Image (cartoon, helix red, strand yellow):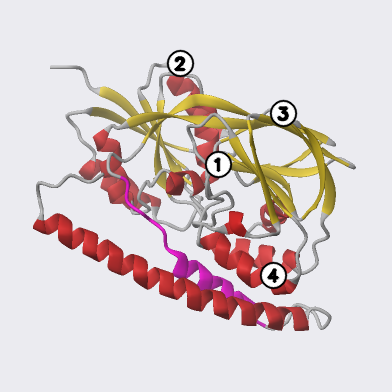
Amino acid sequence: MSPKKQLLFIVNPISGTQDKQLILNQIKEKIDGDLFDVTICKTQYAGHAYDIATEAVKNGVDFVVAIGGDGTINEVGRALIHTKTALGIIPCGSGNGLARHLHIPMDAEKAIDVINELNVKAIDYGVIAGHPFFCTCGVGFDAFVSLKFADSGKRGLLSYLENTLKQSLTYKPETYEIENSTGSVKYKAFLIACANASQYGNNAYIAPQASLTDGKMDIVVLEPFTVLDAGPLAFQLFNRTLDKNSRIKTMLDKKIVIHRASEGVFHFDGDPTIGGKDLEVEIKPLGLNVITPKHPEDNRDLFNFAHIVNEFIQKQPLTTALSEKQKQLAKLNKNVIQKISKIHKVNKITRLNRSSKSTNNPDKKPM
């Protein structure tokens, strides 16, 4: 009989809104005891997940599972790059960008089932100014909002949306120069995102075509836009068609340098920090082993997110000067919700049909 695999769970008690004790109970009930010897550690301070995972690698632990949001996953993942230890994920954060790209279920019990399957694949990761990232990094509006979100002291999706919508009405785009493998180009941009994975999280697909295994990143430049553009942009962001928008410019490369007029904020996997005028961004191919589903399922939930956006927009105007813009944004978002609602219904019917066919044809294997 082969020896059991060493499996370590690292849980961030304060990330997201889910009951962590419930998840720990589910682990005890559902994890395969014939396969694993299980240890559980709780983080106690920022950076603790990295320290725990680093020690696990030294001790020859086979798998380290992050229970938390993108920040916790980034900490654990950084410790595991270029090692034999594989990363597992039980997503509990506000966005869960990497987990969603990998089609890891948002339901903890189903995520535990994925761990029991032990299907491991290697994925790329990126580095911006010395900071590893696994989903996205960038400058401009999304980095600015990440900083405001971190300073707000509040967690959760609604808090993030409040910061996003408030800042979007007044944010001033900057001019950047991107130096890539073919030369350099200047853009006045609302944001520049370097995407290893396809989405920020919450199924907001900033780079719909991005791959975790192609050895390259999708560089997405969103040019300045008016409030009248906000509705179509929001719809395309959640409908995986943002790259079709005329305000979007994209390129594919292994390494770039972003030049800006002065130092300022940038983010890596939503974590903001201050950096210099010149930011080097590079993809490192197949440097992290990750436990992924054998039979991925679509876990998009567009409808709920759009309604949360609408609830915030319908509140009292932020200021008198912005009230007209806010009314226009509310009207546009209502149209977005109607469109997303139709997509949501079609996707639900499609999933039910697939499930019915699978039940009627038990010998047919999923693709």
Residue indicated by mark 4? 229
- Residue positioned 72% across, 68% down in the render: 166
Task: Determine the main secondary structure of the stretch shown in magenta.
Answer: helix
- Residue positioned 59% across, 52% down in the render: 206
Q: Position of residue 229 (x, y in %)?
A: 69, 70
Q: Position of residue 121 (x, y in %)?
A: 38, 29
State the separation of the CA atoms marked 4 and 2: 51 Å
State the separation of the CA atoms marked 4 and 3: 31 Å
User: The disc labelled 4 sits on which kind of residue?
Assistant: Asp
User: The disc labelled 1 sits on which kind of residue?
Assistant: Cys
Q: Which residues are magenta?
A: 296-315
Q: Secondary structure at mark 2?
A: helix
* Residue 344 tag number: none
Q: Mark 4: give few (<14), some (14-19) or many (20+) Cα within 10 Å.
A: some
Q: Secondary structure at mark 3?
A: loop
Mark 4 vs 3, N-terminal side: 3
State the separation of the CA atoms marked 1 and 2: 26 Å
User: The disc labelled 2 sits on which kind of residue?
Assistant: Lys
Residue indicated by mark 3? 181
Q: Is residue 181 magenta?
A: no
Along the horizontal axis of the image, is 285 left or right of 165?
A: left
Query: Which of 42/240 is in front?
Result: 240
State the separation of the CA atoms marked 1 and 4: 26 Å
Residue indicated by mark 2? 58
Circle nearer the viewer, 1 or 2: 1
- Do the residues bearing badges 4 and 3 touch, measured as CB atoms within 8 Å? no
Circle nearer the viewer, 4 or 3: 3
Mark 4 vs 2, N-terminal side: 2
Mark 1 vs 4, N-terminal side: 1
Mark 1 vs 2, N-terminal side: 2
Residue indicated by mark 1? 135
